[in-house]
Image: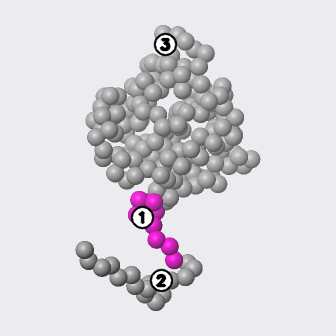
């Protein structure tokens, strides 16, 4: 067994102001505070989201100042409101047009579970067609709840491994939704 020699740090990198971390953590921190959400609002939850973007709650404080209305420039899909079954192919197409890595928030009872609309024409939760990362409860949810859901997405993004999206489990989950 060989002896291990521990040496002092070279001059210039000891003391305050120096820290060591992994590249995954640095990338996760940068991603979590620069999310570009794509609001997909169809009903009353969209009005609450407008309040969330207003000056009183100001989602921009959390690094999400720029809303993206183009799926190719967004990395966070925020689905708010009732999704009719006729709208589900459009929602899935918007999701597929987003670049990886991408995350999804289901805002409100209708996006999460169909809400009070238990009918043949309403999708009973968007998780039937696309994977959802965070659910925000409420009918409609208060802006504080939307901010809390956004904070949960930021934690997920910050702590997600860079290799998670390349794993077999992730590919199997996408395949279960018919996404290649």
Disc nearest the viewer among 3 and 1: 1
Q: Quadrant of residue 95?
A: top left
* Residue at the image point whose x is 48% and y is 37% from the top: 133
Q: Residue furthest top?
A: 120
What kind of element bears circle 1? Answer: loop
Mark 2–mark 3 Cα distance, whole angstroms, equals 63 Å
Residue located beneath label 1 in the image: 22
Answer left or right for 113 relative to 22. Answer: right
Inter-mark Cα distance, 3 to 1 = 48 Å
Q: In the rendered image, is residue 146 in sight?
A: yes
Crowd around label 3: few <14 · some 14–19 · many ≥20 (10 Å): few
For this orientation, the residue located farthest to the bottom is 11
Relative height, residue 5 to residue 40 (above, below): below
Structural crowding at the residue carrying mark 1, measured as other residues with C-alpha within 10 Å and reported as few (<14), some (14–19) or many (≥20)? few
Q: Residue at x 58, y 55 (%)?
A: 63
Residue under pointer 3: 121
Task: Please tell me whether mark 3 sits on a helix, a strand or a loop.
Answer: loop
Q: Earlier in the sequence, mark 2 or mark 1?
A: 2
Q: Marks 2 and 3: which is nearer the front? A: 2
Image position, residue 117 (x, y; %): 57, 14
What is the magenta range?
18-27
Q: Give the residue at mark 2.
A: 13
Give the mark, 2 or 3, whose residue is nearer the N terminus: 2
Label located before the other in sequence (3 or 1): 1
Q: Is residue 179 left or right of residue 120?
A: left
Residue at image point 44% right, 50% down: 160
Q: Quadrant of the N terminus?
A: bottom left
Where is residue 172, by image quadrant? top left
Helix, strand or loop for disc 2:
loop
Q: Position of residue 101 (x, y in %)?
A: 39, 47
């Amino acid at each position: 067994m060989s002896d291990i020699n521990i040496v002092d740090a070279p001059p210039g990198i000891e003391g305050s102001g120096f820290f060591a971390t992994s590249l995954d953590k640095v990338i996760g921190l940068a991603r979590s505070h620069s999310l570009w959400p794509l609001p997909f609002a169809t009903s009353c939850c969209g009005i609450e989201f407008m309040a969330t973007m207003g000056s009183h709650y100001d989602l921009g404080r959390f690094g999400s100042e720029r809303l993206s209305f183009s799926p190719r420039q967004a990395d966070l899909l925020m689905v708010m409101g009732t999704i009719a079954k006729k709208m589900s192919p459009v929602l899935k197409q918007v999701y597929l047009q987003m670049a990886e890595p991408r995350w999804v928030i289901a805002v409100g009872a209708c996006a999460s579970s169909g809400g009070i609309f238990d009918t043949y024409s309403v999708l009973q939760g968007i998780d039937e067609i696309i994977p959802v990362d965070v659910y925000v409860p409420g009918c409609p949810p208060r802006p504080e709840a939307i901010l809390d859901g956004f904070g949960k997405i930021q934690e997920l993004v910050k702590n997600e491994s860079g290799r998670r999206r390349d794993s077999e489990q992730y590919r199997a989950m996408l395949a279960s939704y018919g996404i290649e």
